[in-house]
Amino acid sequence: MKTLTTVEALRAALWHEMRRDRRVILLGEDIGVYGGAFGVTRGLLDEFGPERVINTPISEMSFTGAAIGAALAGLRPVVEIMFMDFITLAMDPLVNWAAKLRYVYDRACPLVVRTPAGGGRGYGPTHSQCFESWFFHVPGLWIAVPSTPADAAGLLRTAIRTENPVLFVEHKRLYGRKGGVSDRLPPVPFGSARIVRKGKDLTLAAWSWMVAEAEEAAQRLAEEGIEAEVLDLRTLVPLDLERLAESVRRTHRLMIVEEGVRSGGAAAEVAARVGESVFEYLDAPIQRVTTPEIPIPASPSLERAAIPNSERIVREAFRLMREFS
Amino acid sequence: MRSRRELYLRLWLIRLFEQKVENLFAKGVLHGTTHTAIGQEAAAVGACSALGPRDVVLSTHRGHGHLIARGGDPCRMMAELFGRETGYSRGRGGSQMMADPSIGFWGSNGITGGGLPIAVGAALAFRLRKERRVALCFFGDGAANQGMFHESLNMAGLWKLPVLFLCENNGYAMSTPTAAASAVPAIAVKAAAYGMPGVTVDGNDLFAVFRAVSEARRRALRGEGPTLIECRTYRLSGHSRGDPRSYRTRAEEAAWRRRDPLRRFRAELKRQGEWDEATERAVRREAARRIAEAIRYARRSPFPDHEAMEKGVFA
């Protein structure tokens, strides 16, 4: 066991997979000498050379498409989209090609698209968004949303080894966060939620950075006598509905925390599925804590007010417990 | 190069397949939509006959001809159009999504220009693994205005990848004439911006296409990078079924019909003394027999099992 930042854990996972399998290549903007906008690929060019660490022009649509072509030709490409906001430019190859190859052509597409998401760093409306909910709507893509360095490394290793195309969401606020990671970086299976904290009064379901906010909220709620269970979904596709339902059967209340905006968000889908499966166990309507229907503002003061945080979760949890006790 | 007779047969197979498809749509036997390649057969057969068995082809929404040219099975194609389990994509892809990896045909594509970056990535992999193969991507004049075209050619030129960009310029992107959509009248000149040669050939002349693709392939295998080949051609049919062709004149169509690629090929065989009435009859009969067989096969085949509909989204 050692302590690593998320950036270090991701880099170690890439390093191990590239050592283990010569078919693994990296493509993306400024991932070579510069090491990627957030330093995840730093040093990998020296280690593996420009044939496997491919620094691309600013052409998200086509280097993502090229990665799919390389995957069809037998490689296992890992693409970096510098900010998730730019994934709009790569939608076509992901949605209309990668996601459909298995269903239509029965062909494997071992592709990973890594991308930094989320706000909290004052980057403004086009460098702060969370778009995982869009991809939730596309059959054929797996979606990883890790919240710790160990899960980031473990899920990335699984993502690289699967035959399915994977959207791998890395929250920017997690990059510098430290955590314990086993020396051998064990792969983490998809579709297996993690109970972060046990509780009996309320389930807080979250993913990515929002797990940290939910954890902090649970601590504060515990001081006030409310025991919240915190569930880290870890992957949205596949979704671990069983563990969610099992938790709700015990706590009878569910609050889903999502950093993305409310309408059409992933939380809405999670809420619907839980409602469909364990409605009779619920003592309260399923609640969502999300960013309101606005572009993410740049001003730190506005951004703090917009994106869900532990104080808001605590406030909403109190309200829920008061109204549906 | 394949035998002259085999090439002529493939031209006729495409022609009759497409005519039959139009006929079946007109009669309401087939549903949905389709884009036929009548008039563009020479570009498909000329290009594919210049490739090696391990090369790969990426195609377009107008892809039936490319698949037949590459050696695809008309039975499985027709079954796909009929929505049957025995179709190339088990009824899941339809007219615009068929693939046969066993003959290096990696798929047609319902998105204009969608195959371009896929071909670039395939070529990237071939080079990385030091395999002597090329990727060829068909696309139309309309796709040359897509961002993907410019990004893909730039990357391929920058990295000198073994990829051939084969533009079938049929004069119209659906209803929009090339001149009304492209700032320059020729597609081939765009190659200059991406550090590769751009050549223009008569796309209705099978031998001209064959020579251009053969030269581009040799160049790619020597490590000298990609080539953009513009084949000037014309689709004698409408864009898709139900196209009233109000954007062009019947006189223009008649002029192009005189340049019909099948007629051109036959004239060339005659000139070389390799043609006689018996060959003509035999080839046409063989093509007609195989298309009729394809329709029988499709009709006999079962529809896909609904139980399996939700299977196979993931590995």
Image: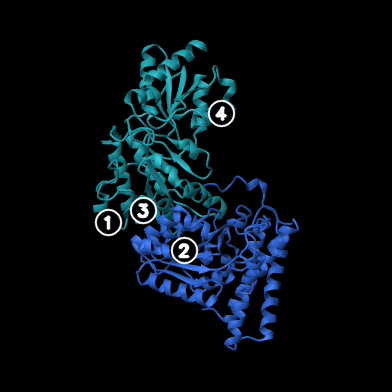
Residue A284, position in %: x, y?
54, 17
* The one of A234 and B81 positioned closer to us in this rendering: B81
Circle 4: element type: helix
Residue A11, position in %: x, y?
29, 44
Mark 3 to mark 2 CA distance (whole Å) = 36 Å
Circle 3: element type: strand
In this view, the mark in front (1 or 2): 2
Q: Chain of mark 1?
A: A
Q: Colour of chain A?
A: cyan
Identity of the amino acid at label 2? Answer: Ile
Q: Which residue is mark 2?
A: B187
Q: Which residue is mark 1?
A: A49
Q: Chain of mark 3?
A: A
Q: Which mark is residue A24?
A: 3
**What residue is at 42 percent from the left and 56 percent from the top?**
B150
Mark 1 to mark 2 CA distance (whole Å) = 36 Å
